[in-house]
Image: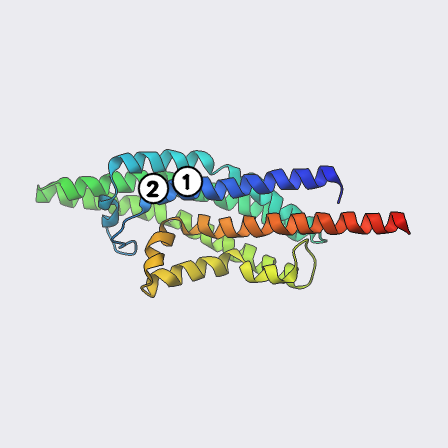
Amino acid sequence: MDKKTYNTLLLTGIAGFLAALLVGIGEFTLQFSPLGGYETEGYGYFANVTKDKLTTGHFFSTLAAPLYILGYWHLGQMFIHGGSKTHGWIITLLGGYAFMVGNAWLGGRIYLALTAHEIAETTDPSIVLQLQSLLSEFGVHNEPLVNALRLAMVVVSILWIWRIVIGKTLYPRWVALFSPALLLGLIFSTYFTGLSIGVWLLPAAMNVVHLVVFSISLYALHRAYKHSRSNLKYLKDN
């Protein structure tokens, strides 16, 4: 691996890490409720988030999300440079597309949240019913988007585990254990098994997953570059 390739992969990997960090901070600000209740119908947990936090989280997360495109280009290149060209491009294109769909989902959360606030603050039963009906319609058009993102992560994870295990990437084989779908499943399990940390992790679960993924990827990149430089030095000396 030459210095130019390393620098390009380093910068795009850092962009991916920043995407996970910034979107994660924004999504946590937007969705975190100390009382939990994320799985209940009606999005009532949003009423526990102040409107100032909703606004801050909305703009912070949606404006940072496009950085995920660079991050997934980085991940794809880590496959391509390891000998998985087709699979690397699938990961790049599918991951980038999925996170843009995910950003559309994320951008819609503010409307769910503000409607949930109005329901909590309204005393007229007829208006509450109308708002609940509207909220339900919002949800029907919002939730399929995040499910599309999760499905894409399952496909990415299958390629991730397969190609890393057979040694056709720049990642060491142990990195196969850190597939996005597996990490996401672990986070959901902390919440649904009643662990208190789950209340904190679930609001920004996908971003927590990718903080881990991009951190490991940057480590693996540095490791691969050092290894390639050592091999080059050995060849020159011999």
Circle 2 residues within 10 Å: few <14, some 14–19, many ≥20: many
Q: Amino acid at mark 1?
A: Ala
Residue 75, image x, y percentages: 61, 48
Residue 153, image x, y percentages: 51, 54
The picture quadrant where one finds residue 16 is top right
In the rendered structure, the answer to whether residue 56 lies left or right of residue 223 reads left
Residue 3, image x, y percentages: 73, 39
Q: Name the residue tied to disc 1.
A: 104
Which residue is at 66% across, 38% downward?
8
Find the distance from the CA under tag 1 to the CA under tag 2.
Answer: 17 Å
Residue at the extreme right of the image, as rendered? 238
Q: Is residue 81 visible?
A: no
For numbered disc 2, what is the local secondary structure? helix
Residue 156, image x, y percentages: 56, 54
Tell me which label, 1 or 2, sits earlier in the chain: 2
Circle 1 residues within 10 Å: few <14, some 14–19, many ≥20: some
In the rendered structure, the answer to whether residue 86 lies left or right of residue 143 reads right
Q: Nearer the viewer, residue 50 or 146?
A: 50
Tag shown at residue 29:
2
For numbered disc 1, what is the local secondary structure? helix
In the rendered structure, the answer to whether residue 75 lies left or right of residue 147 reads right
Q: Amino acid at mark 2?
A: Thr
